[in-house]
Each structure stands twice: as C-alpha cells, then as structure tokens.
Amino acid sequence: MEQVFKLFPGDNLLSGHGPNRCRTCAVVGNSGNLIGSNYGPIIDSHNFVMRMNHAKTVGYERDVGSKTTHHFMYPESAQDLAHNVSLVLIPFKILDLQWLISAFTTGNITRTYTRVLSKIKANKDKVLVLSPHFFMYVYDNWNEHHGRYSSTGMLVTVFALHVCDEVDVYGFGANNLGHWHHYWEKNAGAGAFRVTGVHDGDFEANVTKTLAKDNKIYFFKGV
C-alpha cells in the first residue's frame, strides 16, 4: 500500500459539496440494449461519465457517447485510456494492487488467473483505487449479502450516488428481446452473459428499480 500511495497521488476532483454544486453523472453499463438507443449525446452531456471493464466507444458513439471521465476496471479487464480519463482500479486481491504498480513501472506481471496487460497507457496522476472498506460497505448495506460479492455495475452505481448530485444509469439489463449481451457483440444470441452464481443479478436489479422508483437515480431502459 505504501508503494501504491507513493506512485499514485490520486485525483481530488471527487471531493467537495454544497448547495451551489449540481454534479451530473452517467453510469454506463455494457448491455446490448444500448444499440439503437441514440443515447450518445445525452450521455456526453453529463459532468462525469463512468464506464466499466471492456467498454468501447469508438464506432458506437451515437448510442453510448464518446466521453469518459472514469473507467472502472480490474487487471483482467484492463485497457489503455486517454490522458484525461481516470483509471479506477477495482482490486479483488492483493495481486491486483501489485499489477497496478507493475503496469506503470516494470511490467513484470503478465498473468493473474489469466493473461493480463503487462503495461497500460493511462494518466498516472488520475489513477484511483476503490477501498476494500467500500467493497464491504456496498456488500453489507446494498447487496445485503446476496451473492458472493457485488457486481461491477453495482459498485459503480453506488460510487456515483456518493459523488454525484444526479445519477443517470444506462446499459443495464437485457434488451427488449430478453437477450443478455454486450453492445459491441455482433451475435446477440451468443452473448457473453453467463450465469456464474457469483452475483445476485435479480437482487441487484431490484435495488436499481427501487432507487429509480424513489427518484434517487433515473434509469434509461434502452431498446
């Protein structure tokens, strides 16, 4: 942890609040229900746009937007980022923190449980790391111990609720045909959705529905 804090100064733009601040945030999931939505311009209009894991924008700008301010990932879903984007590491294990250090220095870590990028292009001064305390807070209070741990989408949604004044959620759930797939996949019927038993998708979906019903978030259903 000393190495992490020494190497990454962190981005303090998340702090600060008051009656004169109204920070709007878009949490953009990776569901295929974004295709044909034309949500791109409204997503890009937010102050913060939060994406996760393997999310792509090039070629999909009309539906998902082109702006990203925070990209949440773990080593196995890492990708290069633009200089103005904050890499937000979701560390599930000590090796993830070691990978983060290595990816910006020696590049000696090339595998975790699978091959990972040995080096990553991103702005070192904008790197953020989610605290394990936040993991437990979300799992205890929002998931109520459903599933083995919270999904990335759940973690990012709760994160947004803590740093934003208005939270809009896009790209969660199946499309109108009931297909679960990522918007960049060409074959919806062979989508990447897997029933792993790790997350309780039904419970988390009900949480987001309740938040929308209580006007804590605005949920964009897609198509």
Image (cartoon, rainbow, N blue to C red):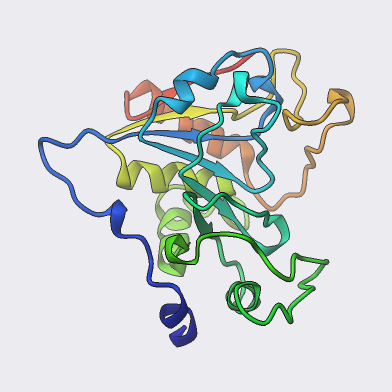
* Identity of the residue drawn at 47% across and 32% down: 208
In the image, 63 versus 203, the foreground residue is: 63
Residue 91 image offset from top left, x and y in percent: 57, 67
* Image quarter in which the C terminus is found: top right
Kindly give the residue lying farthest to the bottom in the view shown.
2
When the figure is inspected, residue 32 is found, relative to residue 158, above or below; the finding is above
Q: Is residue 217 left or right of residue 222?
A: left
Kindly give the residue lying farthest to the front in the view shown.
83
* Identity of the residue drawn at 47% across and 61% down: 135
Residue 127 image offset from top left, x and y in percent: 47, 63
Q: How many marks?
A: 0
When the figure is inspected, residue 93 is found, relative to residue 45, above or below; the finding is below
* Identity of the residue drawn at 59% across and 28% down: 171
When the figure is inspected, residue 88 is found, relative to residue 52, above or below; the finding is below
* Identity of the residue drawn at 56% across and 18% down: 221
Residue 170 image offset from top left, x and y in percent: 53, 27
Q: Is residue 7 left or right of residue 150?
A: left
Q: Can residue 209 be seen in this view?
A: no
When the figure is inspected, residue 89 is found, relative to residue 171, above or below; the finding is below
Q: Is residue 23 visible?
A: yes
In the image, 88 versus 174, the foreground residue is: 88
Q: In this view, does 191 lie to the left or right of 168?
A: right
